[in-house]
Amino acid sequence: MKRILSLLSFAGALTFVVVAAMVQVGCEEASGLNGLTITPSRVTLSTNTSVQTFSVTGGITNQLALPLAWGVSSAALGSISASSSSNALYSRTAANGENTVTVRDQYGNEGYATVTQTSSDYSLTLSASPSTIEVGAASTITITSSSSVSPYVWQLASGAGTGTLTGDSGSTSAVFTGSAVGSAVVQVTDANGVSGTVGITVQDSSSTGGDDGSGGA
């Protein structure tokens, strides 16, 4: 009788272990194409923008099962040139087309992002009105080319000590205000990575000459 009870106890314990193992395996699988999320999920790279950083989140209970395996659908268009933990650096080639960046964790969960590679078949030109100003005066910088794509990144490429630049990412114009004698270069980059520059000269208020339209404070 004792032997029978012992066998029954052993069988019950074995059943519990098997069921627990099955539950654990079921939890660990949780696989699927949408198991991981890559950010950004879609990006366009022109020939002027050769690299893009991607990050990944998700997985079982939102925890990544490291290490991750990164890949691309077309090596002719680009490759994962570096990766660390949840981040990866994609580098495009000179070829144009659509590439897919994939990532897989240790449980088989996957995520993907789309990279569209295009050529920059246009240039971005700027005009400064006026291009020579006095200290305290302002110049309006305008994008004169018609093919640029917002949003824009406005910045001073040089001459930061000569004035300040104010420009909105959705606007095709910005304002440079001179604060010290010298020269500055204003640069704008559009959504396709195409850039353009224009120079501005800042003179002392007692100086003569310069472009028509130079104003005071």
Image (cartoon, rainbow, N blue to C red):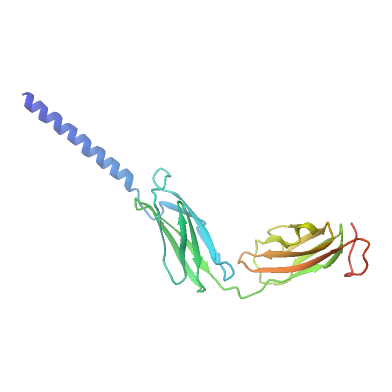
Residue 120 shows in the view: yes
Say which residue appears at 72% left-offset and 68% top-offset.
197
Outermost residue, bottom direction? 121
Q: Position of residue 16 (x, y in %)?
A: 21, 34
Direction from residue 196 to residue 80 in the image, left or right: left
Above or below, 86 against 122 in this view is above
Residue 163 shows in the view: no
Say which residue appears at 29% left-offset and 41% top-offset.
24
Please name whichever residue, 64 or 59, is drawn nearer the observer in this view of the structure. 64
Image quarter in which the C terminus is found? bottom right
Direction from residue 31 to residue 114 in the image, left or right: right
Say which residue appears at 71% left-offset and 65% top-offset.
187
Image quarter in which the N terminus is found? top left
Q: Position of residue 8 (x, y in %)?
A: 12, 30
How many badges with numbers are in the image? 0
Say which residue appears at 80% left-offset and 59% top-offset.
162
